[in-house]
Image (tube, rainbow, N blue to C red):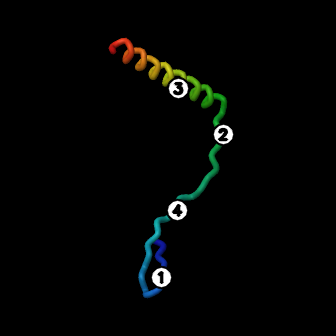
Amino acid sequence: MPYTTEEGGRLNNFAREPKMYEAEPPNGNQKRNYIILGALGLALVSGLFYVAVAVS
């Protein structure tokens, strides 16, 4: 663990920072999956609104 000593002899224990990496842009297959999931989510929310209106 990385400790630092401050004035007066106090020790501070800092968490280790994870290694950083650059995110890769989504490929065509991932983009298609995002579009499909977005459409399914929109259909679910629309269906829930329709049921709420129909019940009330």
Looking at marks 2 and 4 on the same chain, the residue that comes earlier in the sequence is marked by 4
Determine the CA span between mark 3 and mark 2: 18 Å
Looking at marks 1 and 4 on the same chain, the residue that comes earlier in the sequence is marked by 1
Determine the CA span between mark 1 and mark 2: 43 Å
**Crowd rating for badge 3 (residues with CA inside 10 Å; few <14, some 14–19, many 20+):** few
Asked which secondary structure carries label 3, the reply is: helix
Q: Are marks 1 and 4 in contact (CB under 8 Å)?
A: no
Looking at marks 1 and 2 on the same chain, the residue that comes earlier in the sequence is marked by 1
Q: Residue furthest front?
A: 56
Asked which secondary structure carries label 2, the reply is: loop
Residue bearing the label numbered 2: 25
Which amino acid type corresponds to the residue marked 3 in the rendered image? Leu
Against 9, residue 48 (above or below) is above
Which amino acid type corresponds to the residue marked 4 in the rendered image? Glu
Residue bearing the label numbered 3: 37
Of residues 5 and 24, which is closer to you in this image?
A: 5
**Crowd rating for badge 1 (residues with CA inside 10 Å; few <14, some 14–19, many 20+):** few
